[in-house]
Image: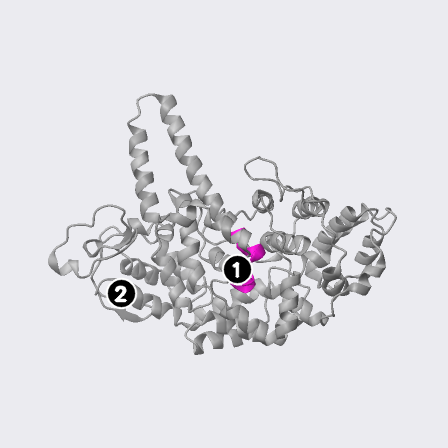
Amino acid sequence: MRPMPHRCVPALAGFAVLLSLLSSCAGRPTDSSTKDAALPSLSRSDIEWLARVNFGIDSASVQEFRRLGRERFLDGQLAARDVALPAPISAEIDTMEISRTDPEHEIAAVNSERQRINLIPDDMGKEQAKKTLNERGNRLAYEAAKRDLLRAVYSPAQLQEQMVWFWSNHFSVFQNKAELRWMVGDYEEHAIRPYTLGHFRDLVLATLEHPAMLQYLDNRQNKSGRSNENYARELLELHTLGVNGGYTQQDVQQLAHVLTGVGINVGQSPGLRRDWQVLYRRRGAFEFNPAQHDFSNKTLLGHTIRGTGFNEVENAVALIVSQKACAHFISQKIARYFVADNPPAPLVDRMTQTFMQTDGDIAAVLRTLFLSREFDAGAGTKFKDPQRFVISAVRFAYDGRPISNTRPLFRWLADLGEAPYGHQTPDGYSLTEVGWASSGQMSRRFEIARGIGAGNAGLFDAEDGGSGATGGFPQLSNRLYFGTVEPRLSAQTRTTLGEANSQQEWNMLLLSSPEFNYE
């Protein structure tokens, strides 16, 4: 593995302490002759490239890479849409309640149930009804997270799954605000997933029109004569231009006026005068109500937005995402996630240029990134956030074997501070090492590695508490390991692994090693 830069030293020091705890153990867990059965080797550069384009290495992705080569493999990933999942995983997702729900129905049902609860005369009955309602919301939110985690582990469209997580974090919503628990599954499925590799403008509009975003950032309260600037500010600062993107407070105010009347309706369509009826829009729970819209002309980023109705919103989004500041902000954030906490400026500049030349084509920007010399040069220096650590560990350890219980994955992410839909503020989870490399985080990762490596993490238990299949511990010193992981290990890690006194302990040491926590 390449020498780590100085910024990695604190985290590596924590690893060194953990590894030293077992440095006095004796005995090698497997016969070195296993290495003779290794798959035909990839170059080290290809291994490191593949590990970052995916949520970590597994045998299927290695075989596909060998068959196609780097550019054709990337082309397939960038074109991936609705790729078939393994049959057991697809069947499990199909049985989930969130596969058959929609926000309009859910919000209406929740509102109706709350009205009923308010009329219950006895306190005990009222509290029990509230508990039942909240439990259903929690179950739907968990199903949304479970579906995401299963897809992240098992989907062949690994780059798409990474970008689903990236954009869900970029356009972050918090499940515990108002009725969002009932909506986060639909938000990811219909406002994020279809647009992850398309044009950025379409992604912005899809999130803008989803009731989860409108409720989370309060735009349902934004009406003519009573404007609410919350969503307008975050749309400029967090979603498109960045805090230094050249907009002013006046731009925030003007955008808020553009967004008046954009809200949620799960009841009857409003009675409108005839000239407003043709301007009214309704799709599911999303509504644009012209009776609540400010039809005055607005000035946004130096351009006039004429008061015409919802077309103003579409024109404003097109104007915002066409700014070079937007192209740079989004390109830099993508590079920060995949390459380095402080990505190389020349790479970000080329990605920005691609964004501008292709009208914000996300796939084209990613292609510029993944085929760059800077992407190769950054291998081994990017610290995994909890999502990448947990998913890559399960993908590598069980290598396509279907797990029956995702609750351990959810619990690990929560313990590591990155629970799905669990970030309260709209800035999303950190993409840099400083957010995740504390001593407490390292200790917790060590325990997760122990659970996965020993096969006692509960991944093969039934979620309903019934009996499950026996998981057993994974044999990680295998063909996949010798073909893709061993060549990247440092001398210290090799020595520590050689001193493990059991296969389970060896597994734990590998999954908690610096090389497994950096990519």
Task: State the residue at coordinates (61%, 36%).
Answer: 467
Residue carrying label 2? 312
Among the two numbered marks 2 and 1 on one chain, the one whose residue lies closer to the N terminus = 1
* Tags 2 and 1 touching, CB below 8 Å: no
Does residue 380 sit above or below 95 in this rendering?
below
Task: State the residue at coordinates (77%, 56%).
Answer: 477
Classify mark 2: residues with Cα within 10 Å, few (<14), some (14-19) or many (20+).
many
- Is residue 292 rendered to the left or right of residue 495? left
Magenta stretch: residue 126 in it? Answer: no
**Amino acid type, label 1:** Glu
Residue range highlighted in magenta = 148-160
> Residue 57 versus residue 114: which sits nearer the camera?
57
Does residue 313 sit above or below 219 in this rendering?
below
Residue carrying label 1? 161
SS for dot 1: helix
Residue 58 figure quarter = bottom right
SS for dot 2: helix
Q: Find residue 174 and report its horizontal and vertical position in percent.
A: 44, 47
Q: Examine the rendering and report whether any part of residue 406 can be seen.
A: yes
Q: Examine the rendering and report whether any part of residue 246 can be seen.
A: no
Q: Find residue 518 and report its horizontal and vertical position in percent.
A: 67, 59
Which secondary structure type mostly characterizes the magenta part of the structure?
helix
Q: Find residue 402 and report its horizontal and vertical position in percent.
A: 60, 51
Does residue 104 sit above or below 7 in this rendering?
above
- Is residue 225 rendered to the left or right of residue 129? left
Residue 451 figure quarter = top right
Distance CA(mark 2)–CA(mark 1): 32 Å
Task: State the residue at coordinates (84%, 46%).
Answer: 501
